[in-house]
Image (cartoon, rainbow, N blue to C red):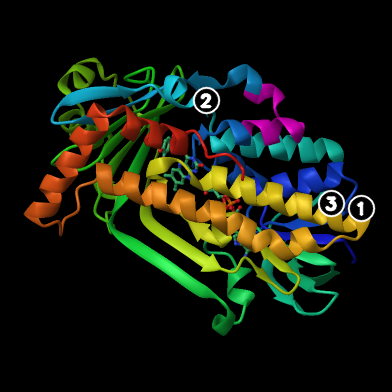
Amino acid sequence: MRTQVGIVGGGPEGLLLARLLGRAGIECIALERRTPEYLRARIRAGLLEQGTVDILTQAGVGDRLARERLIHDGLEIAFDGKRHRIDLKALSGKVVTIYGQAEVQKDLMDAHDAMGTEIVYEADDVSLHGLTSDTPRLRYSKGGQTHEITCDFIAGCDGFHGVSRQAIPQDVVRIYERVYPFGWLGMLSDTTPVNHELIYTNHERGFALCTMRSLTRSRYYLQVSADEDVDDWSDDRFWTELRRRIPADAAAVLQTGPSLEKSVAPLRSFVAEPLRYGRLFLAGDSAHIVPPTGAKGLNLAVTDVRFLTEALVAFYKSGQSDLLDGYSDRCLARVWKAQRFSWWMTNLTHRFPEALPFERRAQGAELAYLVGSKAAQTALAENYVGLPLG
Ligand code: FAD
Ligand code: DHB
């Protein structure tokens, strides 16, 4: 088989790239190891920056998003039992969108089904070959048969645990990493969200986040230890713990109900540089991970895809390779700003088991400074809604 761009991974990045390339008349094949049913049900991110909404709309998958999304003008930060609103719109001129990643995934899959894009689901043993040649190859097995695709370029959109980054010789990649000593336990339920905007709470028992997927579907997260077993958390235990952490006026109106999903995610900051090796380009979580606190992971990955699409379109339409050559640096400039923000927001809102009394007091002072300073709130707001593309 032959194609122009071979894509590893059929998550939101792989499918968005396939969609943008397809609409630009560039051939591609995407290999995804999971089933379509699994992908449609996978619960992850919930908050989209306006830049992400814009590119999804340009990709022709913005209709249901425009109808069903919730627009948030602000958020709340809570500590010492009190809630403080940060007016994102007044401070930055921009708003954010609540629309689940599972919905983005479904919209992209439906659009590809209609367009007839070649997406191979349940592709096993994907491997990458000849990356420094002009004809890199993807090999995979399906239904007991091995297949090979010869490509002009390969896009590694296979997430943190994928094979693309591993295909780069270790001596040419620089890894920057911080693993946090806790994780997030997430729970989804068909209950009315406790507040019409998100509440990020710093509490002595640990961080809690109240978010949502719709006006009738809540999503809550609790800081737990990194090796927490989700089976130890009954619904009752989750609701009791959440009620203890969030401010009393919110706890008083918290609606509880059976969970639809519960899972634990570890928290990590990670960057692999550069994002290119020969004809392989990494995009999204395959190259970088942020702790979820700043809601940046999916948004950052979408920007990589946007830059990669521009570079590939310039190459195929006018033979220009300068955007391909500049791809890694262009992404990294933005990635590091999002890393800094996500790390800062995690430090601000979480309880670190090893924190010195000094650090705990300094964290309290940082929170007090934030809610008392328009300058500090503006800095939070402009990062949270998404920095300009640059
Ligand atoms: P993935 O979604 O991981 O997709 C990679 C795909 O590649 C998968 O479908 C996988 O099955 C496939 N794959 C892997 N290995 C192989 C292989 N060997 N062969 C073939 N296919 C393979 N981000 C935000 O922007 N906003 C938020 O509000 C937010 N909240 C979050 C909350 C939580 C609890 C978590 C865990 C994450 C959150 N994120 C958020 C981050 C966001 O979910 C990720 O950044 C996003 O999924 C990255 O997309 P991706 O396509 O790069 O990777
Ligand atoms: C969601 C997740 C986040 O990490 C965040 O900061 C905001 C929202 C969510 O799942 O809705």
Q: Earlier in the sequence, mark 2 or mark 3?
A: 2
Magenta stretch contains residue 146: no
Does label 2 point to a residue whose CB lies under 8 Å from ligand 1?
Answer: no
> What segment is highlighted magenta in the picture?
53-65
Image quadrant in which you'd find residue 192: top left
From what the image shows, is residue 314 above or below residue 373? below
From what the image shows, is residue 83 above or below residue 106? above
Measured in 3D between alpha carbons, the distance from the residue under mark 2 to the one under mark 1, in whole angstroms, is 34 Å
Residue 272, horizontal then vertical, whole percent:
53, 67
Residue 174, horizontal then vertical, whole percent:
51, 74
Q: Residue at x 53, y 43 (%)?
A: 42
Measured in 3D between alpha carbons, the distance from the residue under mark 2 to the one under mark 3, in whole angstroms, is 29 Å
Q: Which residue is under mark 3?
A: 313
Outermost residue on the front side: it is 375
Image quadrant in which you'd find residue 78: top left
Task: Give the amino acid type for the residue marked by disc 1 in the picture.
Answer: Lys
Q: Which mark is residue 94?
A: 2
Task: Give the amino acid type for the residue marked by disc 3 in the picture.
Answer: Val
Task: Give the amino acid type for the residue marked by disc 2 in the picture.
Answer: Lys
Q: Which residue is under mark 1?
A: 317
